[in-house]
Image (cartoon, helix red, strand yellow):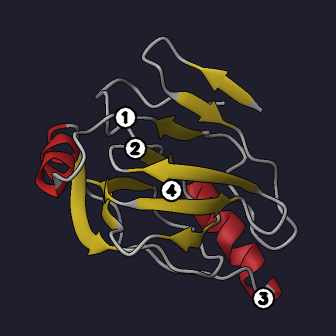
């Protein structure tokens, strides 16, 4: 399901997947053209200003994975990438430099295809635990579902600074 907020963000509610739990309450936020392309430092400054800690620059893994104990913001600073969100039966999105996607804890994601110029800035809410990295193995599920439920909701949208919407 897609909804739009007045600030232009898309809210994407992903259903529970067979191997990737996704988040049962919080939507993925998709901000198109939120940042100037080619300026990773602008993404880092924006995130920092809204209570999210820039943690890395790089790409997105080409395999399904998720973080059960942390929310993650991904800003495409350079290039283009096609990502799949939500696991094998999830949705595919094309993201370009300037786009930001915010993934609540439990949201599966993987890189389906990217150009050579891809540079992503990743960030986590201030005070968040170091993110785990799970892959959807059956033995992970019970612990992951508990960790997702125990992860405090982000207080802000890292792009707008407004309260993070709940489902």
Q: Which residue is mark 4?
A: 151
Q: Secondary structure at mark 4?
A: loop
Q: How many marks?
A: 4
The residue to which callout 1 is attached is 33
On the image, the x and y values in percent for residue 120 come to: 33, 64
Residue 99's label in the rendered image is: 2
Question: Horizontally, is 85 left or right of 142 in the view?
Answer: left
Q: Nearer the viewer, residue 9 or 67?
A: 9
Contact between labelled residues 3 and 1, with CB atoms less than 8 Å apart? no
Residue 9 appears in the figure: yes
Of mark 2 and mark 1, the one earlier in the sequence is 1
Above or below, 146 relative to 155: below
Q: Point out the residue furthest to the top here.
A: 6
From the top left corner, tell me how far across and down residue 148 is, in percent: 61, 60
Answer whether labels 4 and 2 touch (C-beta < 8 Å).
Answer: no
Mark found first going from the N terminus, 4 or 3: 3
Query: Pointer 2 and pointer 1: residues touching (CB < 8 Å)?
Result: yes
Identify the residue shown where x is 81% and y is 48%: 15
**Residues at marks 4 and 2, CA–CA distance in whole angstroms:** 25 Å
Between circles 2 and 3, the one closer to the viewer is 2
Q: Is residue 151 left or right of residue 35?
A: right
Q: Quadrant of residue 88?
A: bottom right
Q: To which residue does mark 3 refer?
A: 139
Q: Residue furthest front?
A: 116
Q: Earlier in the sequence, mark 4 or mark 1?
A: 1
* N-term-proximal mark, 1 vs 3: 1
Q: Is residue 162 above or below residue 35?
A: above
Between circles 4 and 2, the one closer to the viewer is: 2
Whole-number angstrom distance, CA of label 2 to CA of label 1: 5 Å
């Amino acid at each position: 399901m897609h909804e739009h907020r007045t600030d232009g963000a898309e809210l994407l509610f992903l259903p529970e997947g067979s191997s990737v739990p996704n988040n049962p309450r919080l939507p993925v936020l998709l901000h198109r053209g939120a940042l100037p392309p080619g300026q990773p430092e602008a993404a880092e400054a924006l995130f920092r200003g809204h209570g999210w800690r820039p943690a890395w620059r790089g790409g997105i893994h080409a395999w399904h994975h998720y973080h059960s104990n942390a929310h993650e913001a991904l800003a495409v600073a350079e290039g283009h990438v096609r990502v799949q969100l939500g696991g094998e039966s999830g949705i595919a999105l094309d993201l370009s430099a300037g786009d930001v996607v915010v993934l609540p804890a439990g949201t599966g994601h993987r890189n389906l295809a990217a150009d050579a110029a891809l540079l992503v800035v990743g960030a986590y809410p201030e005070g968040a635990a170091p993110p785990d990295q799970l892959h959807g193995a059956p033995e992970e599920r019970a612990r992951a579902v508990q960790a997702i439920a125990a992860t405090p909701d982000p207080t802000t949208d890292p792009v707008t600074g407004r309260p993070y919407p709940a489902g």
